[in-house]
């Protein structure tokens, strides 16, 4: 933090520069993760005609929120202390259609060599007492600034659509009641979480059965086999190559 011997204006300018740069590292870490997600989405759509990721949402904590959390936890208000004690400054939520997609996305992210997985919390296999379900990852992400490499922690939450809907509803209710929710509503929320979990399991079974039917249908048209599509751009395979592979006349 700025020295007290500095002029107040100079102190403010220095602090503004430092906190801006501090938050930019986390913002760039989020950008880096979203780029990775975009690559995975396009790869799956092009190669498997299926996308396990429905949508993503990122969030960067405000300076006020960071400061309030540090005060609540009684930590020293320095940038090093903030970095060591607050792991959710940068947050990324990934919403999937099916439970199996959650673990597929998790494995793909954990397999990326430039990411360091710091922590995994599986609230799907072990839901919270209120019914909350989600898979949480803490990953250490490289960020390349003008003076070299920095590292930033990003919290990733991976959920199904049903889990995300329930969590959003629960948050709104707790916010409205200032976190003092009547017992009747607490029980209703837990019941809704159980219903959402049952729906996820049912949709997973349907998805598996449909995929089995699709895999069994090997009658792909010749025209479809002779073209590839990348980012909505269609390419026809050269006829000479098809003949070489035995796929042409």
Image: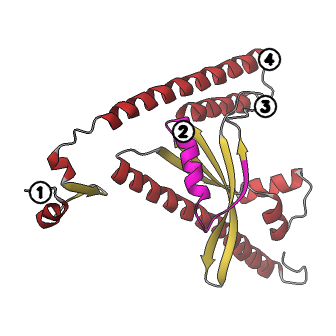
Contact flag, marks 2 and 3 (Cβ < 8 Å) = no
Magenta stretch contains residue 147: no
Q: Is residue 1 left or right of residue 125?
A: right
Mark 3 or 1: the one toward you: 1
Above or below residue 196? Residue 85 is below
Q: Which residue is mark 2?
A: 100
Residue 147 against residue 93 in the figure, above or below: below
Nearest the eye: 215 or 54? 215
> Magenta residues, as a range?
96-120
For the C terminus, the quadrant is bottom left
In terms of depth relative to the viewer, which is nearer, 4 or 188?
188
- The earlier-in-sequence mark between 3 and 1 is 3
Disc tally is 4
Q: Choose mark 3 or mark 4, whichever is in front.
A: 4
Q: Is residue 125 left or right of residue 206?
A: right
Residue 174's place in the image compared with 187, above or below, is: below
User: Is residue 195 positioned above or below 83 on the image?
Assistant: above
Q: Secondary structure at mark 2?
A: helix
Can you tell which quarter of the image residue 12 is in?
bottom right
Name the residue that disc number 1 marks: 248
Residue 97 located within the stretch drawn in magenta = yes
Measured as percent of width and height from the top left, residue 213 is found at 35, 30
- Residue 1 location in percent, x, y? 84, 75
Q: Earlier in the sequence, mark 4 or mark 2?
A: 2
The Cα atoms of the two marked residues, 2 and 1, are separated by 38 Å
Query: Callout 2 environment at 10 Å: few (<14), some (14 to 19), or many (20+)?
Result: some
Q: Are marks 4 and 2 in contact (CB under 8 Å)?
A: no
Mark 4 highlights which residue?
Answer: 183
Q: Is the Cβ of the residue at disc 3 closer than 8 Å to that at disc 1? A: no
Judge from the rendering whether residue 178 lies leftward or rightward of residue 204; answer left or right.
Answer: right
Q: Real-space Cα distance between discs 4 and 1?
A: 69 Å
Query: Neighbour class for label 1 at 10 Å: few (<14), some, many (≥20)?
Result: few
């Amino acid at each position: 933090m700025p020295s007290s011997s500095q002029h107040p204006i100079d102190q403010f300018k220095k602090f503004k520069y430092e906190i801006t740069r501090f938050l930019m590292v986390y913002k760039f870490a989020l950008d880096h993760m979203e780029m990775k997600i975009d690559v995975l989405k396009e790869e799956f759509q092009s190669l498997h005609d299926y996308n396990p990721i429905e949508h993503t949402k990122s969030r960067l904590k405000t300076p006020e929120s960071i400061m309030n959390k540090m005060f609540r936890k009684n930590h020293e208000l320095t940038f090093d202390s903030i970095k060591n004690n607050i792991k959710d400054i940068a947050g990324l939520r990934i919403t999937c259609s099916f439970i199996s997609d959650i673990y597929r996305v998790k494995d793909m992210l954990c397999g990326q060599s430039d990411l360091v997985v710091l922590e995994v919390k599986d609230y799907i296999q072990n839901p919270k007492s209120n019914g909350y379900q989600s898979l949480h990852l803490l990953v250490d992400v490289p960020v390349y600034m003008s003076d070299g490499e920095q590292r930033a922690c990003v919290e990733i939450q991976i959920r199904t659509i049903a889990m995300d809907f329930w969590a959003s509803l629960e948050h709104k209710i707790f916010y409205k009641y200032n976190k003092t929710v009547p017992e009747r509503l607490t029980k209703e929320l837990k019941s809704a979480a159980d219903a959402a979990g049952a729906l996820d399991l049912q949709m997973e079974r349907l998805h598996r059965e449909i995929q089995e039917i699709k895999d069994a249908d090997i009658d792909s048209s010749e025209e479809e086999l002779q073209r590839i599509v990348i980012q909505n751009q269609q390419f026809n395979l050269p006829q000479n190559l098809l003949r070489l592979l035995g796929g042409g006349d």
